[in-house]
Structure formats: structure tokens, C-alpha cells
Amino acid sequence: MTDLDFSTKISKASEYISSQLSEIPDTCLVLGSGLGPLTERAEVLASVPYADIPYFPKTTVQGHEGVLLLAVLSGRKTLIMKGRFHFYEGYSTQEATFYVRVMAKLGVKNLIMTNAAGGINENMKPSELMVITDHISFFCDSPLRGANLDEFGVRFPDQSYVYDREFISTILSCADELGIQIHKGVYAYTRGPQYETPAEIRALRALGADAVGMSTVAEAIVASHSGMRILAVSCITNYAAGITSNPLSHEEVMTNANNASKNSIALMEKFFSKLEDRV
């Protein structure tokens, strides 16, 4: 690791990506657990391994391949991140969200994220989907800590509407057209990698959380700070701790994410078909 400042690292990473891709679309789709097969339905135009991008972290989680794609999905060109980075892998939140800064530097305007989450709201069943309307970031070290990057946003960014209301309305309409069950809810971030305790889940429920997970929130904060429009959809992969007597496992998460894959892919394809350019 060199002693280059953070802004320089962002610039060098974005310059490398620009040199490898014929164009930079205005949208980036981040694939969470179980959504890897979506790329089989897209036309991949170019592929850039994370390992080749200057200062990009490495992804170490099962199911996160670690490659950036330029692809056509539902007739629309997009960047696709196959794998993301997490605090629990040993990265700071600034490092885990480095790719978001790079996307903003490249001119990306829309960040579409998917993730696997534990269900706190018992009206949501494993393998169902939830569009995130708001989040709880109390346990997230702020990725904006330190000197403000003025080229991206203000020192104290408003967080009243992190998740784009028009995008939320569109994804709900898409689900209705497809006959797919989707919920609206609040996503709570925890650091991991251990799953939450039943007491922690009771506390999060009292705070108004509908689902819980170990990603997305820091990324959404940075994207919001950078002026990007954000959509995030969770696949409910298990009931959170204490709701049932069953122990939690990554195997259960992957199984239910894969079970939801068909609906998740159909929903993203429909959403991208309706995504309109905006200056």
C-alpha cells in the first residue's frame, strides 16, 4: 500500500477502468448473494477483474466472484459488480466503499444494490424480497469520517431520502406486473461476521428495523454523499436470531438466496427495462 492520498487512489482506479472499457454507462448494479446467475442473461461486453484495478480491495466471501462487467441488461448498458466488500472482511468502511467513489468519479449516476438479509418483520418469509425504504446505521462506522471529499459532496449530507422514491415506486410496480411478492422496509446494518443475538434482534425490532444485514448501508451513505440515485433490494434469506429455534448458517443464506434467484433476476430485468435516462 502506498502513501497516496485517497482522492488520488480514486482517480487512478477510475482511469484504469476507463482504459479497459469502451464506455461508462450511467448505472451500476451490485449483485448480492444468489444473483450471480443474472449475468448469464445479460450480454457481457467486457470484464475487468477487481484484482487488476488499482487499490480495489479483494472480495473473500463465497458467492462473490470479484469482477466488474460492462454488460447489456434488458437493452440497457450497465456496469455490474459481481461481488462487494465488507467491514467484516477486515476493511474499513472507507475501503469497503471505495468502489462507490470510483463509480461516482466515472460519472455513474444510479447505484442499484442487492443483498441478502435476515428477516425481523415476521410478515416476511425466507426467499421473499424487500425494497429498502430507509436504514439504521448506528453500528456502521461512517465512511465519511475524516477530511471531507469536497469534489463529491458536502461535509454534512442530508439523509432524509437516501433511497430514491421514484426508483422505489418503479420496483414496486415491476413486482406487481410480474406477480412477485415484495415488501417495503427498513434495513439495519450490523458489522458481522457473527450473526446477531436474539437480544440484538429484539432491540433492532424496537428501533423499527424490518431486516438486518452486513452490507449496503455504508455504500448507500457514500453514494448519497456523491449525489447518486439509489435503489436497494434485499432477499430475505432467513428469519433473524430468536424468531425461530433454528441456528443460523451461511448455507441457509445461500440456499434461500438461490431459491429467490428467479424472482430477483426477473425483477431486475423488468426494472432495467423501465430505467430512463435523466440528465
Image: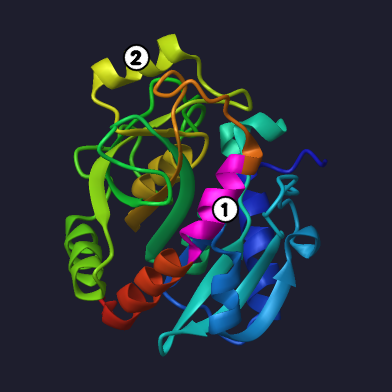
Query: Where's residue 197, x and y in %?
Result: 50, 14
Please, is residue 25 above or below residue 145 in the view? below
Tell me if residue 259 can be seen: yes
Q: Secondary structure at mark 1?
A: loop
The quadrant of the rendering that contains the N terminus is top right
Coordinates of residue 172 in the picture (x, y in percent): 20, 62
> Where is residue 111, by image quadrant?
bottom left
Q: Position of residue 223 (x, y in %)?
A: 41, 50
Residue 178, image x and y in percent?
A: 26, 74
Q: Which amino acid type is marked by label 2? A: Arg
Position of 85 with respect to 175 (left or right) is right
Q: Residue furthest right?
A: 1
For the point 57% across and 34% down, which residue is it? 93
Q: Would residue 69 be counted in the magenta stretch?
A: no
Q: The residue under label 1 is which amino acid type?
A: Ser
Q: Is residue 257 magenta?
A: yes
- Mark 2 secondary-structure assignment: helix
Q: Quadrant of the C terminus?
A: bottom left
Q: Main secondary structure of the magenta part?
A: helix
Which residue is denoted by mark 1 in the rendering?
33
Residues shaded magenta: 252-261
Examine the image and state in which quarter residue 200 appears: top left
Q: CA distance from mark 2 to mark 1?
A: 25 Å
Q: Nearer the viewer, residue 45 or 154?
A: 45
Identify the residue at image location x=65%, y=30%.
Answer: 88
Residue 202 tag number: 2
Q: Answer above or below: position of 200 versus 87.
A: above
Q: Nearer the viewer, residue 262 or 221?
A: 262
